[in-house]
Image (cartoon, rainbow, N blue to C red):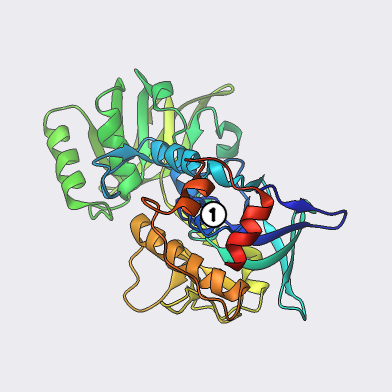
Amino acid sequence: MSPERTKLAIVTDAVIVGAGPCGLFQVFELGLLGLRAELVDSLPAIGGQCTELYPDKPIYDIPAVPVCTARELIERLEQQIKPFNAGLHLGQEVTSVVKREDGRFDVETSRGTRFDAGVVIIAAGVGSFQPRKLGIPGAERYEGTSIHYRVKDAEAFRGKDLVILGGGDSALDWTLSFAETANSVVLIHRRSEFRAAPASVERMFALREEGRVDFMEGTVQSLVEDGDVLKGIRVASRDGITRTVSLDQLLVFWGLSPKLGPIANWGIELNRKTIPVDTHRFQTSVPGIFAIGDINDYPGKKKLILSGFHEAALAAFAIKEYLNPGQKVHLQYTTTSPIMHKRLGVTGEVGDGELESARTA
């Protein structure tokens, strides 16, 4: 299933914008129907928010998987789509999508990669995003060394004195996790109300009573430095007193600043920062452009990974019909279908001729 490459563009059935869990599963669903896909993501690795923000966070609502980390989920999805040989184009974003008179799309990325695509599928999560950063003079000097906006390796923080900023799920989850491994953990939030799950907040206060974590209401005013070393922060507490909190590492979890970026210029109908779709095809206002996952919007929408998987499956059938107008798309089961077995590599690989035959069958 290697894509045809010309001097001008990579010819493919679909370009998927976003290599998070929904984008990866879209590759699988398209592959089952004999369709080729190329993945583009602005991040340097696949996985989207799962990889970028909370790789070690446990996930409990994936069907038949009682628990796995976000990193494990991405690793399993990567393994699942291997038979379909999707192209990966990371560290670049799609900057231009132009629909041609013949119905296909000319797609180009920020690195100059070009595609000749039958459809475009937007699986970009909340869009191109950046963490909300600590707006304190000098903070940028310590990014990646003493100040962190995500946890890449939890073991790197073992035995350290940690200060965590934030009141959402990420801040509380890491507070609870590091309470088991860090030397000390201080959680700082600007108010006593939290956006995190109530059970996590309750657990945090229980740990505080046990003396295993500390909590402060307040806002960061400045950094405490010793030469080129970050030693602590000054925090204006709710009682009007400014206190100095010492630390080895500062973790900031103030959420994301989502931006649609170039997607906003593709001529698609938007609902603020989401893309309205129909629930039959998950197609946008532009025929041939589809949207799945957190970025889409429809009545009753729930921003869950498993919902995105469902959307990817239905979108794949709609895409197959779109690319083969007038041809009936038969539902086949991976358990019993010889064609599905070949595509999955269970009984052998599908050659180009077989793939084309399967498309027109």
Closest to the observer, 212 or 3: 3
Where residue 157 sits: x, y (%)?
A: 40, 24
Determine the residue positioned at 55% across, 70% down.
319
Determine the residue positioned at 43% across, 33% down.
250
Closest to the observer, 270 or 159: 270
Q: Is residue 50 above or below residue 230?
A: below
Determine the residue positioned at 65% across, 62% down.
13
Rendered image quadrant of residue 245: top left
Closest to the observer, 174 or 70: 70
**Which amino acid type is shown beneath numbered disc 1?**
Gly
* Residue 241 seen: no
Which quarter of the rendered picture does the C terminus lie within?
bottom right
Where residue 324 sits: x, y (%)?
A: 61, 74
Determine the residue positioned at 55% across, 38% down.
139
Q: How many marks?
A: 1
- Residue for badge 1: 31
